[in-house]
Image: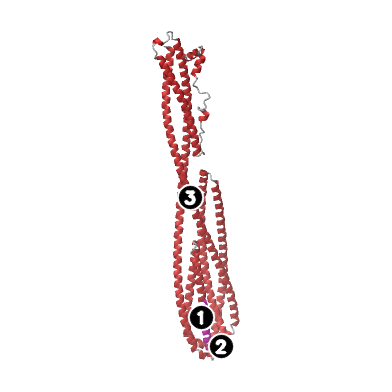
Amino acid sequence: ERGMATTSRGASSPNSSRIDTAAFAHTPKNNTNTPSRSQVSFAGDMEGTDLSDFSARRSTEMNALRSIQTARAVVTSERQRLLSRTQTMTDRPLSERDPLGEGDKKASEEQLFEEVALLMQERDLLLREKSALQAILASSAEEIRRLFEAEQKHVAEMKAWLQQKEDLEGDRESALLQLEQLRGEIEQLKKQVEEQRRDKETMQAEKVEQAKEIDNLSDRLASAQHELGMRRAAEAAHSEEREDWLAQQDAYARQVADAQVNLAAQKEQIDQLKSDAARHKDAKEAWEAERAELMNDRAELHRCRAEASIHLEESKRWASVHEQLLKERADAHAQLQLGLQQMEGQQRSIDLHNSEKAQWLKQQEAASQARAAVEARNKALEEELAKTRVANAQYAKDVQELTSRTARFELDLAEGGRHLAAARADYEKVASLKGSLQEELAATSRELEESRRDRAQLDSSLREARQELSRVAEYEGLYQQEKEEKLLVESKLTQRLGEAQDMCRGAQSEGRQLQELVDMLKAEVQHLNQERQGLVDERTRLQHRLRLTLQELEHLRSNEKRYESESAEWLHTHSTLLERVLRHGRDPL
């Protein structure tokens, strides 16, 4: 109250205008260097800004803070000047003072008013500086929080990517190991084919020796040929056709068995391909899920819509490839079911034919007891000789066909080593071909053994040959019917073999598509590694920004401590000044 009274007295004095002007001469009314509160305040939410924006804002804030500090320094220097002038007036000797004290009192009042105005101005500047520092600290805390959250998110993404990379590397190692195993099996099968080829050459040499023995035997029987005549020729022709047909029936039966084995192998191969396709489908679904999560995280971090569109196109392409694989698998399954049905019908026809053949053989055995002429024996001997020659010719054709099949198999084996799925298909084909080769070699061995036995039975066959002449005419019609059935069976078997080859080609095509799928997965792994490197670079940049922010925060904390000490000093000075003002009001001297 005493201070307010003093102020009102000074305002009512004649020099009040001069005192007011002196008291507020240093108040910056329109000073452009002193920012307002709106200029010092900050937007607390810095989420979504980059490092350059934050640096620009921080530079603006620091410039405003420096301007406030400069203005406060000016006010402080002015206040120090007033304090020094007051101290000078107080320290004057009594001789220089006004005896009545009016002039000193007025000067003291004017200095007090000026000092109070400067203190108020300094208080306003300190409040502004405090607000600016609080805004800087708030923005720094928000930036540090945002950087910490980004770092935590980045660490979680890096862990997920590392786990995905380890899984993909494990899948790649297992695929390489499986490929090496298949290559070893193919090499082993090649060795087995070479062994079979050598056995075949040995059998051919034995067959040549047997042919020589047969030629010698035919020379011995040259004398008996003069006694045979026209009936022997006709009987030999009919018997030759009958035996030829029986041999062909046996060959067709073997081909049917081979076809069944091939179909079983193809079925196993298709089942294996189905399991592989299911496994690849599961791996693809897992990869697509992980890929979707990865792209979502990267979209939130980098806001990159172009990569999301690329991922969508790749997903569509993967869906089309998977749909094509399912369609081809369904077609192969339908062909397999159709082939099995046809094989069952063929087996029933073969069983019916075998029963009719057994009945016919029984009738033939009953009729053979009525023939005992020497001429029939001679004709039967010639018939057996002709049959042996025909069998040898047929065997030569079979050997030639086997050689061509072996050459084709080698070509297929060379082609199958290019792809993983094709190698598996070739493995199944080699296994089936090996079984057929073994059966053919066993049949050849049996034929050679039968030929040896036939040489011993030639003498007895000469005695029984004449008995067969009379019953050949009875079974000529039955033989013609069996010949037609033989042609029908041959056409059906040829059709089934073509269908089995088509199924093999379809399985090979599906295997190549699966290999292309594996290659595309490898390319995706490489792309993920590149993206991981980009995230590592981003993490380094964020860590650098975090270090800079922490350094700046430490600097702000030191400034805050300094400002607190200065505020305490200012409060102490202000309290001292108030005490002096109060004391001066009580005692003007």
| Residue 319 location (% of width, % of height) | 56, 54
Whether tag 3 and tag 1 are in contact, CB under 8 A, the answer is no
Considering only order in the chain, which callout, 1 or 2, is on the residue closer to the N terminus? 2
Kind of residue sitting beneath label 2: Arg
| Residue 198 location (% of width, % of height) | 45, 74
Provide the major secondary structure of the magenta segment. Answer: helix
Please name which of the two marks, 2 or 3, marks the residue nearer to the observer: 3
The residues tagged by marks 2 and 3 sit, at their Cα atoms, a distance apart of: 88 Å
Q: Is 465 situated above or below 330?
A: below
Q: Is residue 428 visible?
A: no
- Mark 2 crowdedness (10 Å alpha carbons): few <14, some 14-19, many ≥20: many
Please name which of the two marks, 2 or 1, marks the residue nearer to the observer: 1
Give the residues drawn in magenta, as a range. Answer: 378-398
- Residue at figure coordinates x 54%, y 62% from the top left: 509
Q: Quadrant of the C terminus?
A: top left
Q: Is 390 contained in the magenta span?
A: yes
Q: Is 40 situated above or below 352?
A: above
Residue 530, numbered circle: 3
In this picture, residue 148 sits left or right of residue 480: left
- Residue at figure coordinates x 51%, y 46% from the top left: 298
Residue 142, numbered circle: none
Helix, strand or loop status at disc 2: helix
The residues tagged by marks 2 and 1 sit, at their Cα atoms, a distance apart of: 21 Å
Q: Nearer the viewer, residue 158 or 2?
A: 2
Residue 232, numbered circle: 2
The residue that mark 1 highlights is 392
- Residue at figure coordinates x 52%, y 58% from the top left: 516
Residue lying at the far front in this picture: please name it: 96
Helix, strand or loop status at disc 1: helix
